[in-house]
Image (spheres, rainbow, N blue to C red):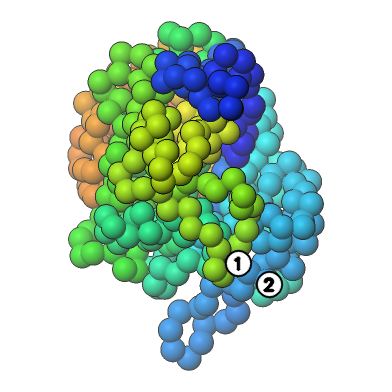
Amino acid sequence: MAVTLEHQGTAGLADSSGALSSRAAAEAFLGGVCFKLGPPALIGAELEWLTVQGECPASGPIPRPRLSALAAALGPHAPLSLDPGSPALPLPGGSRVTVEPGGQIELSSDPFTTAADLCDNLRADARLLTELLAAADIKPVARAADADRCADRVLRSPRYRAMERFFAGIGPFGKLMMCNTAATQVSVDAGADAAEVAARWTMLYAAGPALVAAFACSPDLRGAPPGDWASQRMRTWLRLDNTRTRPPVQDWPDPITGYARWALDVPLLCLRRPDEPVNRSVPGCPDWSPPPGATFADWMSGALDDEVGRRPGTDDLRYHLTTLFPPVRASGYFEIRYLDAQPGEDWTVPVHLFDALLSTRQVVAEATRLAASTAGQWSQAARCGLTDPEIRGSAADLLELAAAHARTPAAATDLAAAARRCRAGRTPADEPIRVLP
């Protein structure tokens, strides 16, 4: 659910050369591919972990895993970025394994009809992943930010090379985000109709700052400029490229139209060369850096004809969507991307949280109301976390609302405990590490 954009029909969108026929056609295509309408029924998640290999040396931090060791440990489950010949099989619970630029490992679940089934299958896959990695003396580390190691990109694909170059022109946060952070992400259906899509989208953004604070647990990040932040991971996203990570959603009366227009005007992060394979991961890989400042709309209009030599098609537009990093990304469903990776197995709490807050239109409306006073306070939430009394109150209110509408007694218990934690101003890292049976 959280990895691949489904293919849509392209009739009328592209001309005979395969290029997109007009900006209006591209916006219409984006509305369909980013916001699939249907009764909300599915939920999925992505879990990320930092990784280490071996024991702590006499001096310095534990090293990142060797890619060859990761590939060997994962065997037939290794992603193509590690082994282009791998079958890249999912784990038994349906989760697919990917590797991030700094060696972080990620599980992307199948979509499930209940949060309980999602958690059961994803938990089983996470435990199997830990066993597979242990055979190569590799450990996943449930931290949202790396406090010990300098940022170091170990994946040498053309995509990540172009990303690092692009972000380096802005500051240090891009490479830190790519190599030294990890998140817990939850994915949910967009909605049955345009009104429900708008309501769910609005709630997820309004509640975002309070929930960033509720789950913030990354105060230390090696290489970050000085400053006290509850979520250094979220700080990296807020500082690396505002055009790509902070869409002006407050100005969009209709998120479907607004997102499409915004996406076309975000600068290109990387530009695939059609004669080079996407998953090439070797030193000396091709340069996918785009012309500086060029947007997808520029490419589509012909402004890049001299540099690129071709106009973009729908596959290029789909790829461009994967280089957008807003707090909630529209990928046919909503990817909620703003929470820190959680200690132990506490990642189940955000899964049940969003499942409950989106359970009915009435609950969505009430959550939006509870979050209204802190909506938009992303930087304040990431910096101060639960020490800000207004944000702390919003976070606890939202968790209590979720507990009241949880699908199972166990989920209600966990959400109520998280609400009490927030009321007391305690972070997830302040609690005992939870390992579920």
Mark 2 surroundings within 10 Å by alpha-carbon count, few (fewer than 14), some (14 through 19), many (20 or more): some
Quarter assignment of residue 409: top right
x 54%, y 11%: residue: 192
- In this view, the residue in front, 309 or 97, is 309
**Left or right: where does residue 286 sit relative to residue 59?**
right
Secondary structure of the residue carrying tag 1 is: loop
- Please name the amino acid that badge 2 sits on: Ala
- In this view, the residue in front, 430 or 133, is 133
Q: Which mark is residue 69?
A: 2
Q: Position of residue 381 (x, y in %)?
A: 26, 42
Q: Position of residue 86 (x, y in %)?
A: 77, 56
- In this view, the residue in front, 302 or 223, is 302
Q: Is residue 81 visible?
A: yes
Number of marks in the rendered image: 2
Seen in the picture, residue 68 relative to 227 is either above or below; the reply is below
Seen in the picture, residue 99 relative to 381 is either above or below; the reply is below
Q: Position of residue 341 (x, y in %)?
A: 47, 51
Secondary structure of the residue carrying tag 2 is: helix
Residue holding disc 1: 282
